[in-house]
Image: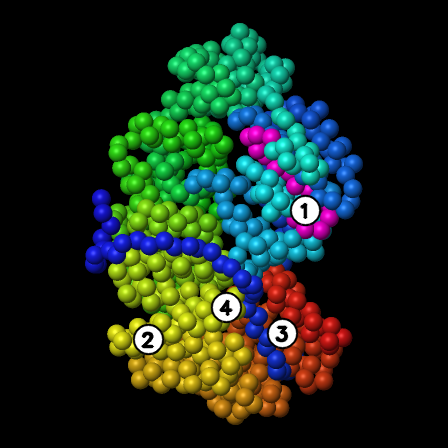
């Protein structure tokens, strides 16, 4: 099986996806004023995170360990962050115990409960990826690029919060805990690991070894799940089951699941199947015992569910839903959904969440992934792993492209190539659903990008990166943005698609500009400009000139910027690209304001507003109006400024633009302050601060400084 390519591929070259130096976030400081207004919007602060799963009603025993470790935590000094490492063999119930501990201490940590799984389908998770997810839970908005700076932000963000409890699953070495420990004092870190990590003891951590249930606890668990009557009917089978599972909770859970799925099935039948599976190997390690229990659960599956269990183990992402399952098994989403439910009922998958767009979302629990891969290696044909990954990537590409074209219809359309054209890509009812899907799938999309690059499927790489454009623009996760676009750029080059290479380079420049790497961004846009001119690609040339104008302006070089922007405007005008002209005019208006030419600013911003309204681009039309209000204010036309600012704010609120709803309040506060209406300015800044607190700490801090100046 080969990937379709338009030309002969070039030999691969090494790519290093790292970001070094002092990266920082872009901050657009908007001076100037608009007018006095009192507006009230609901605060969009994120909820206090409660990411740890509820404790199962079947929780049994462990009270001695729970009491001991709780007392140890209470005895620690207030100025430290206690670390508890719960270690033990596979299937011993480390995660369940950690969840029970965290919930029992919830009242001590009002900042919330955070959870991160440091394992993934492709091996240990990248600490930078985990940091990004944790930071977005407590501090929405754009993040810096680079692992070291992310770690610094994480410590700073948590130091400013009430104490939090962080659960880290699947830790393999001490550096992971060190990098992820919250800043400040009073927090708690609870981690799980298959093995003890002795160097943590020297740093004051508590290492708690968790063992299997003793026979009494195992019997209590079975009684709670199956009922005492069922146990009384077959006492010898109960004793044998406890012995065969060695009291390991994972083995007991799998056995209970089989019995509850078949209420009339004798317990002795399950014990017999488990005994036969155990007899096939002489191993008695905890891993072998759990594997034997997994074998018996797998043997109970019907053919299609067993096939899905094996094939899903090939995927690079960590979660699966019915549409993705349908894509890799060539079934309908309804059929695949039934298979997923069957696997969850067998405890071979865990139902992780119910997503508003994806529906039920599942993942492999603990040792089940390795077990599924072992069966896949034995029972699937050669090439099945590659086929499953390609089918999954093609489905992701088709669905992400549908989201891209709904969310950003003006984004340059590039060809999509599929080995297996998906029959059931997810469908989106509206823009919010599309962006919600992209956000929920961003981690798995990145996993597919990395996997495709490693496999040499370069067309898939740049096409996935390109299709994710709405998410890059909305989330502004610059570390992933830059990594993905560097991979996409190299992949487009190796795929021998010059236009895709230019799109990747242009988007990479936007990301670099976002972290204030202006010189590198300018280098990207300059290369795009030269290539576009060589190909006589007027659209690409105009876009590159526009981006050069935006970058030089943000770099504090307005005189240089205006030359680029005027060239971009002329080109777009010659192409009758009315929307493009208007977008450039918004930037030109800002440059004119910077140079003190309010008359020119008002003219181009008013024209941009009219055009964007006519071409039905409500978001950018509101942006033009907000800047027009600023221009009126700088010109001393406070009544016009007030009217424009009010209208822009209403339009942003109507169209759900949270970032610009907050920004328009800030701009209205600046107007009130400039007009001497300090009380109005304080009110507006306060409202803007409430909005920004749920979006961006950087913007919130800027408004906080303006609020203090106005008080």
| SS under mark 4 | loop
Instruction: Give the crowd class for mark 3: few <14, some 14-19, many >=20 residues within 10 Å.
Output: many
x%, y% of residue 328?
32, 41
Mark toward the start of the polypeptide (4 vs 3): 4
Tell me if residue 158 is in the magenta stretch.
no
Res 164 seen here:
yes
- In the picture, the disc for residue 14 is none
**Distance between mark 2 and mark 1 Cα atoms:** 51 Å
Left or right: 121 in relation to 661: left
For discs 1 and 4, the disc positioned in front in the rendered view? 4
Say which of 2 and 685 sits in front: 2
Disc 2 packing (10 Å; few <14; some 14–19; many ≥20)? some
Determine the CA span between mark 4 and mark 2: 20 Å
Q: Nearer the viewer, mark 3 or mark 2?
A: 2
Percent x, y of residue 668: 63, 78
**SS at mark 3?**
helix
Q: Earlier in the sequence, mark 4 or mark 2?
A: 4
On the image, numbered disc 4 is attached to which residue? 517
**What is the secondary structure assignment of the residue under circle 2?**
helix
The span from disc 1 to disc 4 (Cα, nearest Å) is 34 Å
Quadrant assignment for the N terminus: top left
Does label 2 or label 1 sit earlier along the sequence? Answer: 1
Q: Which mark is residue 666?
A: 3
Q: Pick whichever of labels 1 and 4 is earlier in the sequence.
A: 1
Q: Nearer the viewer, mark 4 or mark 3?
A: 4
Q: In percent of the image, x 45 and y 52: which residue is there?
A: 442
The residue that mark 1 highlights is 164
**Magenta stretch holds residue 187:** yes
Q: Which residues are magenta?
A: 182-196
547 relative to 499, above or below = below
């Amino acid at each position: 099986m080969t990937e379709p390519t338009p030309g002969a591929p070039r030999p691969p070259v090494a790519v290093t996806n790292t970001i070094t130096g002092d990266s920082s976030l872009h901050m657009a400081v908007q001076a100037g004023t608009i007018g006095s207004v009192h507006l009230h919007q609901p605060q969009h602060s994120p909820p206090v995170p409660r990411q740890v799963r509820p404790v199962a009603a079947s929780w049994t025993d462990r009270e001695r360990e729970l009491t001991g470790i709780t007392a140890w935590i209470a005895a620690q000094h207030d100025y430290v962050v206690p670390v508890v490492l719960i270690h033990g063999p596979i299937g011993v119930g480390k995660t369940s115990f950690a969840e029970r501990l965290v919930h029992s201490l919830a009242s001590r940590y009002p900042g919330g409960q955070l959870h991160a799984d440091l394992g993934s389908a492709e091996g240990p998770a990248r600490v930078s990826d985990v940091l990004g997810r944790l930071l977005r839970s407590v501090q929405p908005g754009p993040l810096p690029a680079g692992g070291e700076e992310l770690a610094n932000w994480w410590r700073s963000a948590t130091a400013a919060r009430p104490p939090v409890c962080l659960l880290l699953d699947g830790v393999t070495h001490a550096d992971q805990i060190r990098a992820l420990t919250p800043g400040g004092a009073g927090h708690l870190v609870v981690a799980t690991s298959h093995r003890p990590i002795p160097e943590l003891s020297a740093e004051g951590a508590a290492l708690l070894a968790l063992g299997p249930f003793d026979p009494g606890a195992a019997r209590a668990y079975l009684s709670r799940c199956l009922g005492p009557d069922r146990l009384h009917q077959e006492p010898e089978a109960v004793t044998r089951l406890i012995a065969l599972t060695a009291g390991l909770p994972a083995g007991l859970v799998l056995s209970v699941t089989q019995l509850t799925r078949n209420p009339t099935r004798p317990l002795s039948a399950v014990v017999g199947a488990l005994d036969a599976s155990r007899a096939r190997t002489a191993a008695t390690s905890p891993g072998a015992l759990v594997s034997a229990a997994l074998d018996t659960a797998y043997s109970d599956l019907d053919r299609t569910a067993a096939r899905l269990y094996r094939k899903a183990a090939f995927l690079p992402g960590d979660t699966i839903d019915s549409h993705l399952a349908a894509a890799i098994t060539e079934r309908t989403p309804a059929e695949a959904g039934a298979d997923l439910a069957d696997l969850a009922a067998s405890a071979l998958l865990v139902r992780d969440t119910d997503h508003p767009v994806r529906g039920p979302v599942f993942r492999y629990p603990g040792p089940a992934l390795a077990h599924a891969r072992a069966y896949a290696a034995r029972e699937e044909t050669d090439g099945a792993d590659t086929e499953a990954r390609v089918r999954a990537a093609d489905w992701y590409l088709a669905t992400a492209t549908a989201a891209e074209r709904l969310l950003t219809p003006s984004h340059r359309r590039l060809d999509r190539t599929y080995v297996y054209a998906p029959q059931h890509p997810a469908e989106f009812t509206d823009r919010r659903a599309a962006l919600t899907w992209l956000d929920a799938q961003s981690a798995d999309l990145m996993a597919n990008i990395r996997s495709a690059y490693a496999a040499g499927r370069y067309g898939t790489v740049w096409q996935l990166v390109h299709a994710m454009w709405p998410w890059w623009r909305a989330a502004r996760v610059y570390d992933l943005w830059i990594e993905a676009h560097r991979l996409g750029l190299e992949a487009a080059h190796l795929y021998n698609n010059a236009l895709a290479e230019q799109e990747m380079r242009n988007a990479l420049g936007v990301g670099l500009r976002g972290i204030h790497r202006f010189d590198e961004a300018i280098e990207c846009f300059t290369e795009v400009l030269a290539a576009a001119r060589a190909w006589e690609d007027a659209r690409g040339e105009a876009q590159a000139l526009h981006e050069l104008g935006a970058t030089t302006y943000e770099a504090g070089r307005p005189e240089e910027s205006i030359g680029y922007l005027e060239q971009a405007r002329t080109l777009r005008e010659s192409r009758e690209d009315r929307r493009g002209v208007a977008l450039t005019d918004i930037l030109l208006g800002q440059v004119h304001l910077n140079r003190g030419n309010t008359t020119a600013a008002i003219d181009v911003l008013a024209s941009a507003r009219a055009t964007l309204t006519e071409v039905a681009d409500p978001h950018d039309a509101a942006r033009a109006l907000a800047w027009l209000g600023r221009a009126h204010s700088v010109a001393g036309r406070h009544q016009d400024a007030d009217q424009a600012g009010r209208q822009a704010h209403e339009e942003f609120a109507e169209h759900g633009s949270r970032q610009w709803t907050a920004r328009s309040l800030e701009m209205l506060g600046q107007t009130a302050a400039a007009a001497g209406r300090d009380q109005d300015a304080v009110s507006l800044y306060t409202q803007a601060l409430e909005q920004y607190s749920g979006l961006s700490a950087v913007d919130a801090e800027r408004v906080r400084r303006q609020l203090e100046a106005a008080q």
